[in-house]
Amino acid sequence: MKLLRLVPDNTNLPFMKWRRVTFPLSAALSLLAVVLFFTVGLNFGIDFRGGTLMEVQSKSGPADLATLRSTLTALDLGEVQLQRFGADNDVLIRLAQQPGGDAAQQAAVAKVKGTLGDAYDYRRVEVVGPRVSGELVQSGILGMLVAIIGILIYLWFRFEWEFAVGATIATLHDVVLTIGFFSLLQLDFDLSSVAAVLTIMGYSVNDTVVIYDRIREMLRRYKRIPIEELLDLAMNTTLARTVITSTTVILSLLGLFFFGPEAIQSFVQAMLFGAVVGIYSSAFIAAPLLIYFGLRTQRGTDAAEDAATGNKKAAKAAAGGAAKPGTTPAGA
């Protein structure tokens, strides 16, 4: 039975040559992501801003957003945002945080329900007060910082410093681009988004560690190959594993994207973007960085030491042969 091969055995892609394009591209995209974060900002969800989220469904066909907006604005509840999702009769209603705490939030929900009446089904209602949202912001930031520090500690003990720094830069690259992705598309940034960022970090580190393990294995096996050729060889030998794993992840996420509920769409879109970026950074950021961290010099030192060791062994063998009994120097 012939096995399925998504990547041919003789694949020999010049990954290291492409770094002259991918490095400037990543730098430009990272700079753009930072600019978007500080100018456009994140579209914080109810979890972080506080307020009320109501998911309603019209019973009489497509919802008229213009009429619905004017009706809710007349209630004097502050900022009201409407968003159609899924079918034409599904609408998300976001109400600004009400002064007066949880009681005022609940009163706003009751006011909306009383105004809309039985014309809509109320499928989901979430109310988050200012105190809770502030605690969630602190917990989310703390969780991301702890995860980043934990990954740095793991990489430092798992690899030599060149590998640890390269993996760290690649992981931060993925996080920055993902934050820029949220800012560009103005996706809801809530607790599920924090989970998406943490998952992307883990996925990126996992793929990078697999490639780095293969590079270290080949450093011990091939002592004379130039560093760029060795990195290309390592990348091509792990390419099949990367393609199979990434295809499985992306297919699963596509299923959630097309058939999943609206509540997880921000999470799924961020994960799809992060999966692609994680593959890209492992191949075109993490591995090529080793060239600039002096791994080439280290390989030259190893080759020189191997040559010196080989010369010593040859000299010792020659001396041993000359000392054997029954041998006489020429001309004696």
Image (spheres, rainbow, N blue to C red):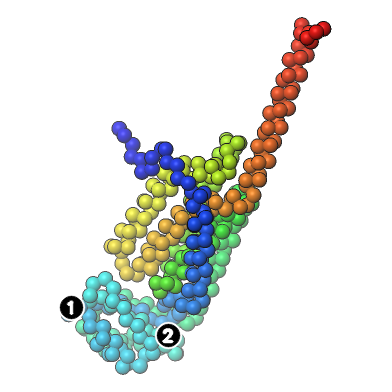
Residue nearer the viewer, 303 or 158: 303
Circle 2 is placed at which residue position? 97
Q: Is residue 223 above or below residue 124?
A: above
Residue extending furthest toward the left: 60
Q: Is residue 106 visible from the viewing direction of this image?
A: no
Residue nearer the viewer, 100 or 323: 323
Tag count: 2
Residue at position x 49%, y 81% from top? Answer: 131
Q: Is residue 259 above or below residue 75?
A: above
In the rendered image, residue 226, in percent from the top left (x then y), is placed at: 58, 41
Could you tell whether 48 is left or right of 264 in the image? Answer: right
Instruction: Check disc 1: other Cα within 10 Å, few if <14, some if 14-19, many if 20+.
Output: few
Residue at position x 64%, y 49% from top? Answer: 294
Screen quadrant of the C terminus: top right
In the rendered image, residue 314, in percent from the top left (x then y), is placed at: 70, 23
Instruction: Check disc 2: other Cα within 10 Å, few if <14, some if 14-19, many if 20+.
Output: many
Quarter assignment of residue 100:
bottom left
Tell me the amino acid under the disc marked 1.
Gly
Screen quadrant of the N terminus: top left
Quarter assignment of residue 105:
bottom left
| Sooner in the amino-acid sequence: mark 2 or mark 1 | 1
Tell me the amino acid under the disc marked 2.
Gln
In the rendered image, residue 16, in percent from the top left (x then y), is placed at: 52, 49
Circle 1 is placed at which residue position? 61
Q: Is residue 75 visible from the viewing direction of this image?
A: yes
Q: Is residue 22 above or below residue 9?
A: below
Q: Is residue 113 above or below residue 272?
A: below
Q: Secondary structure at mark 1?
A: loop
In the rendered image, residue 77, in percent from the top left (x then y), is placed at: 37, 90
Residue extending furthest toward the front: 331
Residue 326, disc: none
